[in-house]
Image: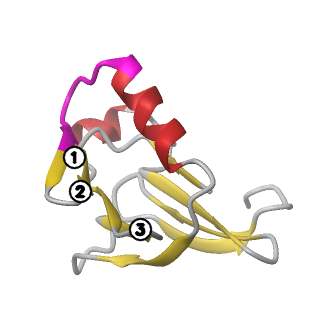
Amino acid sequence: MLNTCGTHWKLFLHGSSFEATERIDISLAQQIAAFLKGKPVIEAGLLNVAGTQLFVLFKGGYLFVVTPSETDDEHDGVPYWELFLPGHQMVEVGPKSKLSFRRSDQPAA
């Protein structure tokens, strides 16, 4: 499972793409979330040296990229994104240069 407050994301679908920057139509975001729901993740990783830009490749060739911006830092203490992994593990990035790998079934330190 992926949670994100990253205001800039892009979804690539077989030659087409959908992009959100500062604002997005909520109905479009809901449609995209419903479309990707239940699709297996093939690969996930970081695209930049700072470790803040995330890519997630879904089965079927759907590529989702989250690129946080400085405006995301306005949400004090809220991570740019969280990726929940098997075995109750999670990766949490942001705000700013914060990076953590921890158990998801225990409170943050």
* Residue shown at 70% from the left, 73% from the top: 102
Q: Position of residue 9 (x, y in %)?
A: 27, 47
Q: In the image, which is nearer the foreground, mark 1 or mark 3?
A: 3
Q: What label sits on residue 69 in the rendered view?
A: 1
The magenta segment: 18-27
The alpha-carbon separation of the residues under discs 1 and 2 comes to 20 Å
Would you identify the image quadrant in which residue 22 lies? top left
The residue that mark 3 highlights is: 60
Q: Is residue 8 above or below residue 24?
A: below
Instruction: Give left or right: position of 59 versus 13.
Output: right
**Residue 10 at what x, y percent from top left?**
23, 50
Q: What is the three-letter code of the residue carrying label 3?
A: Gly
Lower sequence index among marks 1 and 3? 3
For residue 101, above or below residue 69:
below
Question: Under tag 2, what secondary structure?
Answer: strand
Q: Residue at x 47, y 54 (%)?
A: 81
Classify residue 66 as left or right of residue 2: left
> Where is mark 2, residue-wise?
12
Q: Which mark is residue 14?
A: none
Above-or-below relation of 42 to 95? below
Question: Which of these two is toward me, 31 or 5?
Answer: 31
Residue 15: horizontal and vertical position, in percent? 14, 58
Determine which quarter of the picture holds residue 87: bottom right
Per the image, label 3 sits on a secondary structure element best described as loop
Q: Quadrant of the C terminus?
A: bottom right
Name which residue type carries label 1: Ser
**Image depth: mark 3 or mark 2 in front:** 3
